[in-house]
Amino acid sequence: MKNIKLNEQWDLDITAKRLQEVEGSENDKQNLSSILKTFKGSDIFDLDLGINWIPIINYPTKENIREAIKDGLSQFYKNVIIEDFEIKEDKKRRLYYVNLQIKLEGQIEELEFAIGE
């Protein structure tokens, strides 16, 4: 399945006045990243998209974050397995940086994102 490609700033990727498309594992990675970076209820077109990060930010344990990620991703990808998981905390900015390896349909996808941005 093809999808519209987003660039590093999460804007539409337009090259030579044309929207770029993404498919395959790159599409899966973009979809997974979108779910992880979206606060549940903040997308007006799909209120179920994303993860309910608010209670996690208030009580951030590794297990809470892991469960929130698994629950959020399993809404859209039923066979998601979290292979590896690492969190780094930035206390000054109240951010949590997550490095994640996810197994999806036999392929490992590596993702990095921040909670609280």
Image (tube, rainbow, N blue to C red):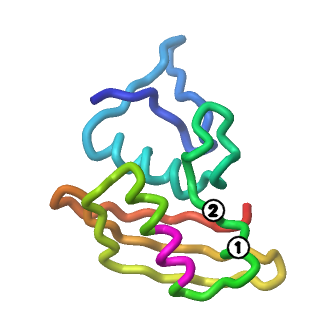
Q: How far is disc 2 from disc 1 in space, using C-alphas? A: 7 Å
Count of labels in the image? 2
Query: Circle 1 — which element?
Result: helix
Nearer to the camera, 108 or 77: 77
Predominant secondary structure, magenta span = helix
Location of residue 98 by image quarter: bottom right
Residue 66 part of the magenta-drawn span = yes
- Side of 106 relative to 38 (left or right): left
Q: Residue at x 43, y 45 (%)?
A: 31
Nearer to the camera, 6 or 104: 104
Amino acid type, residue under disc 1 in the picture? Pro
Q: Position of residue 27 (x, y in %)?
A: 35, 40
Nearer to the camera, 56 or 11: 56
Furthest residue in direction top, as rendered: 17
Q: Residue at x 55, y 77 (%)?
A: 65
Q: Residue at x 48, y 78 (%)?
A: 66
CB under 8 Å between discs 2 and 1 = yes
Label 1 sits on residue: 55
* Magenta segment boundaries in residue numbering: 64-69
Amino acid type, residue under disc 2 in the picture? Asn
Q: Residue at x 55, y 46 (%)?
A: 49
Q: Position of residue 108 (x, y in %)?
A: 25, 64
Q: Position of residue 90 (x, y in %)?
A: 73, 81
Q: Which mark is residue 83?
A: none
- Side of 34 relative to 1 (left or right): right
For disc 1, the neighbor class at 10 Å (few under 14, some 14 to 19, many from 20) is: few
Label 2 sits on residue: 52
Q: Position of residue 61 (x, y in %)?
A: 61, 88
Say above or below: 37 vs 7.
below
Nearer to the camera, 44 or 34: 44
